[in-house]
Image (cartoon, rainbow, N blue to C red):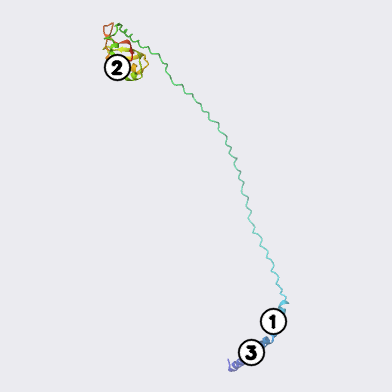
């Protein structure tokens, strides 16, 4: 590049800088004096009256035709099997055989055992028991029960004595009471302890048991 060209370019830059500076000054003055308001108002008016024309929409693209599907034959229809019908089974018949009754042997009558031999007849008493002495004489005033004396009880007691083979009294039964239990008890007690007998004799000549009846009268002794 030549020196002349460089100088020309430097001059142009200087001019441009000056022009720009002047524009700034003018704009600053316009703002200060209110010219900027008119400019802005005019610009707003121009913006309001500006018609914006929208470009037409692009034409709709038609969808491509569907691809031709190959003709496939429909699947063969499978016939469903007939439903199973369960037939009721016939009832099972159970034949019951009655159990035979248990065997019961017929009881046979056993022969009766022979009858035992008849017992020998009891020996017949040949001789009755005899008291050795008077039984009334076995009692004294001292044998009178004290309770009967105090109650002034008296009377006759009848008894039946059992005489053993040894001649002693083995049993005493009151057959008729005197009305006083004290007098009845004293009668049996004294005869058991004091009476002695000659035992009875059977037909075989052996001593045997026997009974003997006696009446004892109790009277309160006189003072």
Characterize the local packing of mark 2: few (<14), some (14-19) or many (20 or more) Cα atoms within 10 angstroms: few
The image shows residue 168 at horizontal and vertical percentages of 27, 13
The image shows residue 59 at horizontal and vertical percentages of 69, 67
- CA separation in Å, label 2 and label 3: 188 Å
State the SS at label 2. helix
Query: How many labels, in total?
Result: 3
Comparing 164 with 116, the one in front is 164
Q: Which residue corresponds to the image point at 72% horizontal and 77% vertical from the top-left?
A: 48
Comparing 166 with 195, the one in front is 195
Q: Measured along the vertical axis of the image, is residue 62 above or below residue 180?
A: below
- For label 3, the residue is 21
Q: Measured along the vertical axis of the image, is residue 123 above or below residue 46?
A: above
The image shows residue 47 at horizontal and vertical percentages of 71, 78
Characterize the local packing of mark 3: few (<14), some (14-19) or many (20 or more) Cα atoms within 10 angstroms: few
Q: Earlier in the sequence, mark 1 or mark 2?
A: 1
State the SS at label 3. helix
Comparing 127 with 22, the one in front is 127
The image shows residue 167 at horizontal and vertical percentages of 27, 11
- For label 2, the residue is 143
- Kindly indicate the quadrant of the structure image that contains residue 36: bottom right
- For label 1, the residue is 40
Q: Which residue corresponds to the image point at 71% horizontal and 81% vertical from the top-left?
A: 41
- Kindly indicate the quadrant of the structure image that contains residue 138: top left
Quadrant location of the C terminus in the rendered image? top left
- 2 and 3 marks in contact (CB < 8 Å): no
Q: Earlier in the sequence, mark 1 or mark 3?
A: 3
Closest to the camera, between mark 2 and mark 3, is: 2
Q: Residue furthest right?
A: 49
């Amino acid at each position: 590049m030549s020196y002349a060209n460089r100088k020309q370019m430097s001059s142009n830059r200087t001019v441009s800088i000056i022009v720009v500076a002047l524009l700034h000054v003018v704009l600053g003055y316009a703002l200060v004096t209110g010219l900027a308001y008119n400019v802005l108002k005019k610009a707003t008016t121009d913006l309001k009256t500006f018609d914006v024309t929208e470009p037409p929409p692009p034409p709709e693209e038609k969808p491509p035709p569907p691809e031709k599907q190959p003709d496939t034959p429909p699947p063969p229809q499978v016939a469903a099997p007939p439903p199973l019908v369960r037939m009721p089974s016939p009832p099972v018949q159970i034949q019951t055989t009655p159990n035979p009754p248990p065997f019961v042997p017929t009881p046979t009558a056993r022969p009766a055992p022979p009858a035992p031999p008849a017992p020998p007849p009891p020996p017949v008493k040949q001789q009755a028991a005899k008291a050795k002495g008077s039984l009334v004489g076995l009692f004294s005033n001292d044998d009178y029960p004290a309770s009967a004396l105090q109650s002034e009880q008296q009377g006759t007691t009848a008894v039946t004595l059992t005489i053993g083979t040894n001649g002693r009294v083995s049993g005493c039964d009151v057959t008729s009471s005197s009305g006083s239990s004290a007098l009845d008890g004293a009668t049996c007690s004294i005869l058991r302890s004091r009476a002695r007998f000659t035992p009875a004799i059977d037909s075989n000549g052996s001593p045997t048991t026997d009974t003997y009846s006696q009446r004892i009268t109790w009277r309160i002794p006189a003072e």
